[in-house]
Image (tube, helix red, strand yellow):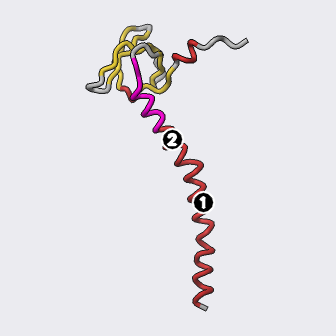
Amino acid sequence: MILQASAGGIGSMLPFLAMIVVIYFFMIRPQMKKQKNEKKFQADIVKGTRVITSSGIHGKIVEVNENDNTITIETGAGKIKFEKAAVSMDLTNKLNAPAKK
């Protein structure tokens, strides 16, 4: 009797545990990987890179200040100072790529 009750308890928890594993591999793990890549990108920012900020401003990096984690971006309207964390995308490779026919 006691053996059957404990086997039923483990069997009823199996779908719940499977659901947690699926959520981890399809939601949590890819998000962690994306954050890791974004941090690496922001740490490797160099002068001359064309970027887009998280607010949608396009520009070219003209100064990188490592002391306070800021960058200066030259846009059509002038130079603007941003936090490195505000940079979301590198456009240098996309702009230098040959046009598709």
Q: Earlier in the sequence, mark 1 or mark 2?
A: 1
The residue depicted at 57 percent of the width and 17 percent of the height is: 94
Nearer the viewer's eye, disc 1 or disc 2? 2
Inspect the image, locate mark 2, and give the three-letter code of the amino acid beneath it.
Lys
| Residue 5 image point, x, y percent | 59, 85
Asked if disc 1 and disc 2 are in contact, CB closer than 8 Å, the reply is: no
Span shown in magenta: 36-46
| Residue 26 image point, x, y percent | 59, 49
Q: Is residue 14 left or right of residue 78?
A: right
Residue marked by disc 1? 19
Vertical relation: 37 (above or below) 22: above
The magenta stretch spans residue 3:
no
Vertical relation: 20 (above or below) 78: below
| Residue 23 image point, x, y percent | 57, 53
Residue marked by disc 2? 33
Inspect the image, locate mark 1, and give the three-letter code of the amino acid beneath it.
Met
The residue depicted at 47 percent of the width and 19 percent of the height is: 51
The residue depicted at 61 percent of the width and 80 percent of the height is: 7
| Residue 62 image point, x, y percent | 37, 12
Vertical relation: 85 (above or below) 77: below
